[in-house]
């Protein structure tokens, strides 16, 4: 882990949202987007945090993300929504969609929204956290740029398409699963390339579609679009059940891109300098649809304790529950958030253009 | 593949349902259960087919499955159900629940049911097929006997907890993902034990919680409950993302056992000679909740073709879509179904007690 600096959460939020306002976003959309990014850093998911600011700024400047997109409700029922994001920022589009789902779930017990013509929406789990705050079950899925090779394929066709789902507990922290359906994200290969270490053979395959343990070669192939790519959860073969990760990734793409009549597979980020067409699926379920919140919380507490109290493997001290590490990180980063020096410098370089400065905590 | 005999589907259905009627089931429940089992054999999932008849018969005889269970609707809303199966056969309980979901989804666009106090329900995909027949999206989850070790654990706490989800296509066959959340089922270890071949290290771990490649040792440990067990999809470590399979398994358990206030984790099959307390979650979504059937079918056809037409890995001729192999098997086994000679003999031995004979096609 590199040396880390710390900045105040409140100041970082002001800084990030100011940058977005300078890029043309409305104040509220800028605030929402900043909150999604900072929440990722607070939860220890730096890959999806403020380190991505440059990319969003670039996309806003060249119109690949529309700062003032017209978001349309294409279809609305008591329990569902189809939304067209108009090529806007993924975060406010999805925030609003999830808020509508929560409101409808309060009235009608559940609601699901499929969303097309959006953009990168940050961590999938953010929108689940919105439902959890309202003591509801939340779900959030998104397709992504095609980075993953289907089982028995050799080219990227599907995304890392994450699945996030959360359930409110009582005394315990919520259960919050937030996982890409590839074995690992591309960033993990970069870490191993820097360390000059071989990667496990379930992470990536080469231009022949066969697994490789060479992270440098795999990254170069991905950057040059020379074939090969990340492998689905389970790896390259049916022997290790890579077809299951592939199936889950396709499921996400269907609920997002196919169901919304938006972009899916290779069509996501299919053209340069135009909106990427990322598609999402979010939803909220009111526990009153089943046995109510108190009963859910009581049973989920027991379930989580059963998992955590189970005997540990040799060399292990803890069994974790989905989301637990991220909640612990978030609690540690309540007031200030850690940033790598390189990220801190990049933020200030971006801010310079708009006369904005970020200082250390 | 061992030598296989073939029997007529219609005769097998009569035979299996007659056995169940002799064990106390009502004719309709017996017919439904037979159909679920034979559908598995037709779809090439022999592990969940009529080969399991002996186990169901044994459980019915000792009261571990109640032949005439009182199934209660604990809670009902326009879009949800909580059902108590009363310790009955999993197949008719879940068939009825899914049928109710489909009926409600026709009226109210979607419905989900969580079901407690049930038993082994066969292939998860069967209930999704019911929704697909009605041109709806279907989902089916179940918890199972604890056979899987959580990440960093050493004892079985969670089940192989399958996820099945399906979407109706137009010209293409439906997309039907039906996957256990463990890397493999126990049956795969048995195959490798017979072949005296080592297993991949993502399949099972020993009593120390560390992965093992010895299938015989792993099976003996599982049978003696000596610790160790199957590994979640992704294997034993976070390096290969075993925590994702573990998270998915827990998600299934929460939607089934926790949400229904039923049995979960080690409580499933927790006591001998009483109902196992298996819990399920099924649901149906009407495409009219989103953009309607025709739009879904059109986009899903395109998506499936995109996957299938993608370039193949070296040595591969086809990229499969979830469910495709099973649909092809089912079409081949429309009139007759293949059975291993051992299974055929076992069925006749079971039938003998009730004066029933099964003949070859």
Image (spheres, coloured by chain):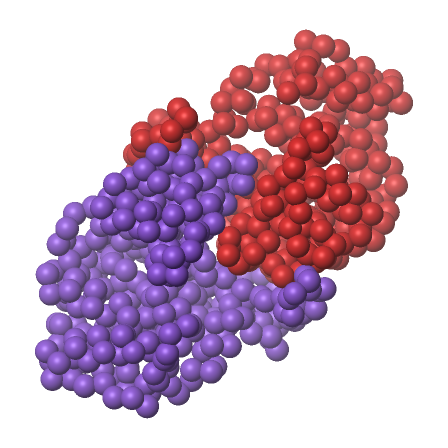
Chain colours: A red, B purple
Residue A303, horizontal then vertical, whole percent: 32, 37
In front: B349, or A265? Answer: B349
Q: Quadrant of residue B101?
A: bottom left
Determine whether, in the image, residue B85 is placed left or right of residue B42. Answer: left
- The residue depicted at 61 percent of the width and 78 percent of the height is B171
Q: Is residue B173 above or below residue B8?
A: above
Q: Quadrant of the C terminus of chain B?
A: bottom left
Q: Residue placed farthest to the front in the image?
A: B196
Residue B18, horizontal then vertical, whole percent: 19, 80
- The residue depicted at 34 percent of the width and 83 percent of the height is B5
- The residue depicted at 58 percent of the width and 71 percent of the height is B169
- Can the viewer see residue A230 in this picture? no
Q: Is residue B112 above or below residue B297?
A: above
- The residue depicted at 59 percent of the width and 26 percent of the height is A44
Q: Quadrant of residue A209?
A: bottom right
Determine whether, in the image, residue A23 is placed left or right of residue B159. Answer: right
In front: A191, or B278? Answer: A191
Q: Quadrant of the N terminus of chain B?
A: bottom left
């Amino acid at each position: 882990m590199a040396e880390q600096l710390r900045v105040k959460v409140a100041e970082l939020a002001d800084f990030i949202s100011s940058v977005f306002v300078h890029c043309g976003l409305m104040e509220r959309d800028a605030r929402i987007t900043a909150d999604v990014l900072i929440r990722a850093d607070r939860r220890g998911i730096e890959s999806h945090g403020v380190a991505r600011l440059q990319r969003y700024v670039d996309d806003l400047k060249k119109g690949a993300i529309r700062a003032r997109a017209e978001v349309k409700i294409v279809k609305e029922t008591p329990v569902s929504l189809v939304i067209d994001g108009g090529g806007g920022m993924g975060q406010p589009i999805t925030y609003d969609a999830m808020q509508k789902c929560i409101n409808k779930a309060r009235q009608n017990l559940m609601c699901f929204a499929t969303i097309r013509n959006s953009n990168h929406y940050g961590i999938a789990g953010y929108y689940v956290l919105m439902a959890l705050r309202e003591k509801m079950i939340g779900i959030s899925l998104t397709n992504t740029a095609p980075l993953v090779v289907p089982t028995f394929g050799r080219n990227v066709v599907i995304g890392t398409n994450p699945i996030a789902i959360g359930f409110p507990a009582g005394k315990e922290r919520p259960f919050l699963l937030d996982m890409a359906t590839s074995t690992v994200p591309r960033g993990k290969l970069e870490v191993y390339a820097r360390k000059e270490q071989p990667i496990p053979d379930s992470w990536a395959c080469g231009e022949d579609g066969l697994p490789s343990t060479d992270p440098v070669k795999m990254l170069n192939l991905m950057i040059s679009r020379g074939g090969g790519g990340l492998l689905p959860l389970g790896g390259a073969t049916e022997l290790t059940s890579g077809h299951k990760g592939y199936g889950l990734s396709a499921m996400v793409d269907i609920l997002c891109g196919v169901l919304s009549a938006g972009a899916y597979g290779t069509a996501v980020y299919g053209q340069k300098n135009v909106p990427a067409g990322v598609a999402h699926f979010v939803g909220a379920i009111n526990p009153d649809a089943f046995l109510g919140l108190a009963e859910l919380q009581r049973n989920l507490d027991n379930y989580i304790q059963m998992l955590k109290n189970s005997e540990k493997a040799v060399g292990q001290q803890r069994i974790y529950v989905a989301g637990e590490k991220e909640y612990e990180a978030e609690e540690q980063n309540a007031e200030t958030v850690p940033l790598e020096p390189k990220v801190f410098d990049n933020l200030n370089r971006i801010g310079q253009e708009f006369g904005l400065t970020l200082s250390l905590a």
